[in-house]
Image (cartoon, rainbow, N blue to C red):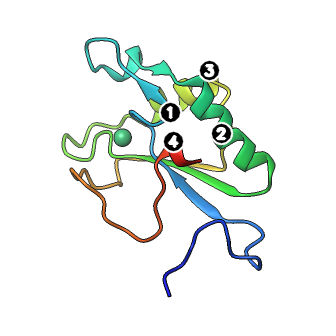
């Protein structure tokens, strides 16, 4: 039997890794990180998970390939958007085209 995230009665809180681009923010045109616009409804979903006691780790592959450090600009955005989180990891998440995993949810499913 595969794990069914969120339905385990013994699992009171979870460590949740949350993607940033196209998950809690989007771009109208040019994909420059300083021009990212917040997806307020999605941020509120994550903030609710935080308020419920879950550990929230935002992580992004920004800079994974270029090796440019985007930590400060990313943190500035999260703080401006009132994102609640415990940790921010920038540039360590691999950049992939598709994630196949038994422990994932799209933000639309939350
Ligand atoms: Mg993304």
- Above or below, comparing residue 87 to residue 38 in the picture: below
Q: CA distance from mark 2 to mark 1?
A: 10 Å
Q: Earlier in the sequence, mark 3 or mark 2?
A: 2
Query: Regarding mark 1 in the picture, which secondary structure is present there?
Result: loop
Q: Position of residue 50 (x, y in %)?
A: 73, 48
Which residue is tagged 3?
Answer: 80
- Above or below, comparing residue 105 to residue 12 in the picture: above
Foreground mark, 1 or 4, reads 4
Which residue is tagged 1?
Answer: 24
Q: CA distance from mark 3 to mark 2?
A: 17 Å
Q: Earlier in the sequence, mark 1 or mark 3?
A: 1
Q: Residues within 10 Å of mark 1 (few under 14, many from 20)?
A: many
Q: Earlier in the sequence, mark 1 or mark 4?
A: 1
Relative to the observer, which residue lies in front, 56 or 110? 110
Q: Are marks 3 and 2 in contact (CB under 8 Å)?
A: no
Q: Residues within 10 Å of mark 2 (few under 14, many from 20)?
A: some
Residue 14: which quarter of the image?
bottom right
Q: Is mark 4 within 8 Å of ligand 1?
A: no
Query: Regarding mark 3 in the picture, which secondary structure is present there?
Result: helix
Q: CA distance from mark 4 to mark 3?
A: 23 Å
Q: Earlier in the sequence, mark 4 or mark 3?
A: 3
The residue located at (45%, 38%) in the rendering is 20
Q: Earlier in the sequence, mark 2 or mark 1?
A: 1
Which residue is tagged 2?
Answer: 45
Foreground mark, 4 or 2, reads 4
Which residue is tagged 4?
Answer: 108
Q: CA distance from mark 1 to mark 4?
A: 11 Å
- Above or below, comparing residue 25 to residue 65 in the picture: above
């Amino acid at each position: 039997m595969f794990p069914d995230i969120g339905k385990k009665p013994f699992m009171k809180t979870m460590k949740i890794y949350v993607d940033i681009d196209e998950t809690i923010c989007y771009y109208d045109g040019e994909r420059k990180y300083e021009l990212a616009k917040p997806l307020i409804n999605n941020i509120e979903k994550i903030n609710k998970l935080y308020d419920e006691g879950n550990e929230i780790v935002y992580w992004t592959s920004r800079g994974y390939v270029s090796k440019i450090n985007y930590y400060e600009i990313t943190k500035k955005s999260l703080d401006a958007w009132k994102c609640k989180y415990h940790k921010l990891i920038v540039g360590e998440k691999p950049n992939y085209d598709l994630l196949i995993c038994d422990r994932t949810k799209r933000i639309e499913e939350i």
